Image: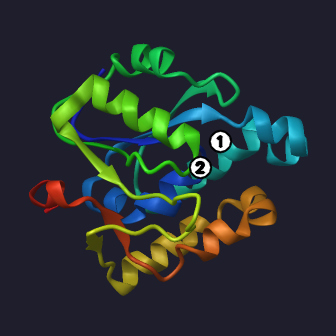
Amino acid sequence: MKIKNLLLAPHNDDEALFTSYIILKFKPLVVIVTDAVKHELKFGSMSGIMVRRKESEEAMKILGAKIEFLGIPDTGLYIDNLVVNLEDFEVTGKVFAPALQQGHPDHDVVSLAADKVWGDKVIYYSTYTKENLTPEGALAIIPTKKEEDLKNKALACYISQLKINKPHFDAVKGKPEFYFEKYEEDID
């Protein structure tokens, strides 16, 4: 599939938590890599696959982006199987992927797979680390008031996650989003 810009989100909600401003600016195809099998097993259908997909779809409508789901179970995410799935996307512009930050292991797998498939086309966005839920980086994307409001509306769509993961949402509200220095010229 040939597309201009692509954004990879390891889980449903990462796209709004960490890249709302990128989505608003570049209108990439947002690809959610995993399905929430672990959450469905732990919390039941109230936080399961179909609920989380619907939440992502609603949030992406607010941010104006198309969305696809790879459907890889989060219990079976490996670099090799992800690379095979990603090779179907022919990207002519930019690829946005989580930075390798040793926060959530799935984020790191997605980062490594994106690098393997697209190399220099990838712009890495900041998520969180084991020590800090608030993303940090050398270069900030400072939102306008309108962009911040749209992000907040998108975040409100993730009702299932707000019930069980509210600290992740609190850590990004009202804050800029970040990417890494060597990509400064690519984000403008």
Q: Residue furthest left?
A: 185
The quarter holding residue 148 reads bottom left
Vertical arrangement, residue 184 with respect to residue 175, above or below: above
Vertical arrangement, residue 153 with respect to residue 68, above or below: below
Q: Nearer the viewer, residue 41 or 100?
A: 100
- Asked if residue 156 shows in the view, the reply is no
Q: Is residue 114 left or right of residue 164?
A: left
For image coordinates 74% across by 37% down, the residue present is 50
Q: Tell me if mark 1 has few (under 14), some (14-19) or many (20+) residues whose alpha carbon lies within 10 angstroms of its own.
A: many
Position in image of residue 145 (x %, y %):
38, 86
Give the quadrant of the C terminus: bottom left
- Asked if residue 150 shows in the view, the reply is yes
Position in image of residue 82 (x %, y %):
47, 21
For label 2, the SS is helix
Q: Tell me if mark 2 has few (under 14), some (14-19) or many (20+) residues whose alpha carbon lies within 10 angstroms of its own.
A: many
Amino acid type shown at disc 2? Ser
Q: Nearer the viewer, residue 168 or 147?
A: 168
Q: Residue furthest bottom?
A: 145
Spatial separation of the CA atoms under disc 2 and disc 1: 5 Å
Give the quadrant of the N terminus: top left
The quarter holding residue 131 reads bottom right
Q: On the image, numbered disc 1 is attached to which residue? A: 53
For label 1, the SS is helix
Vertical arrangement, residue 137 with respect to residue 100, above or below: below
For image coordinates 72% across by 69% down, the residue present is 166
For image coordinates 21% across by 31% down, the residue present is 119
Q: Are marks 2 and 1 in contact (CB under 8 Å)?
A: yes
